[in-house]
Image: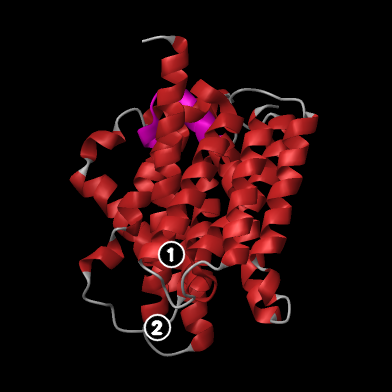
Amino acid sequence: MSVGSDRAAFVALAVLGGGCLALQSRINGELGHQLGDGIAAATVSFGVGLAVMLLALPWMHRNTGRILHALRSGQLRWWQCIGGACGAFLVTTQGLTVPWLGVSIFIVALVAGQSASSLAMDRLGVGPGGPRLITRNRALGALLCVGAVVIAVGDSFGDPRSLGFAALPLLAGIGVAWQQGVNGRVALAATSPWPATLLNFAVGTVALSVALAIESAVRGGGPPGAFPAEPWLYVGGPLGIVFIAISAAVVHRIGVLLLGLGMIAGQVLGALAIDAVLPGPAGRPDLLTLTGAALTLVAVRIAARG
């Protein structure tokens, strides 16, 4: 297989990972809606994913000890091993905001944060590829992504609550860019993406369990709501396994930029398809949302030329 076909295959995997994230957003958003608690939905999602990795897929544990060796030797820093906290925040925002915004606007806001912050992550050398210069095209692409959010939520400017909800996935996108960079370093140290994925789910589950315990203590009473019976509401965790594993496996082969671009394309296209076929409480994508999504894809194309 040629270098060009290898790169195309890895980018296709990134697009698949982005599509998984869009579908996970819809599932976790519905779970959060039914439970009436986004943190509880995120905890369930991460907990199911961690259980799948520990019980159903024990071969994923191999090479985990290499992470400890890399920490002791200084190849890794402790803060590079807590990317799962950003994943926990992302999944929490899915449960909190998707019922209000819909998958399309959620993904557009997420993409804007991810695109803008990826410039800083590349410049600082957070990922395994080392520092990368901020070119004109990449900066223009990031600005266009931010503009896409403004257009997508343009009809919500009179509703401060909707704008506040859109800010959460924007912040989550910033965390995703950092998470992808540090996960790449962990995967490189472990010589496999699976230990990095397992570590993400372990860190995220612990962080969410603590947050849920604090929320329950402040709120008082028992669980936030009865758990729904539909099995499909609990596959958000396994979809997260696919998303995180692809990120960790691909980032050091095609770089943070191409990984992010492929996943952004998968997120946007997947979100539009999901909201069009299975509209949630927010309804089908309107003209402003479609325009914002199209502008996001244009921004990705411009940034790719950088």
* Amino acid type of the residue tagged 2 in the rendering: Pro
Q: Helix or strand or loop: what does disc 1 sit on?
A: helix
Q: Residue furthest front?
A: 287
Picture disc at residue 224: 2
Corner quadrant of residue 222: bottom left
Give the residue pinned by disc 1. Answer: 275
Highlighted magenta segment, given as a residue range: 182-195
| Residue 69 appears in view | no
Q: Is residue 295 above or below residue 46?
A: above
Residue placed most toward the observer, 41 or 139: 139
Residues at marks 2 and 1, CA–CA distance in whole angstroms: 27 Å
Residue drawn at x 73%, y 55% is 147
Corner quadrant of residue 205: bottom left
Membership of 169 in magenta stretch:
no
- The quadrant of the picture occupied by the N terminus is top left
Q: Helix or strand or loop: what does disc 2 sit on?
A: loop
* Amino acid type of the residue tagged 1 in the rendering: Asp
Membership of 185 in magenta stretch:
yes
User: Which of the two marks, 2 or 1, is nearer to us in this view?
Assistant: 1
Residue drawn at x 28%, y 78% is 227
Label 1: how many Cα within 10 Å (few below 14, some 14–19, many 20+): many
Q: Horizontal placement of 112 versus 207: left or right?
A: right
Residue placed most toward the observer, 220 or 45: 45
Residue 237 percent coordinates (x, y): 34, 55
- The quadrant of the picture occupied by the C terminus is top right
Residue 158 percent coordinates (x, y): 73, 81
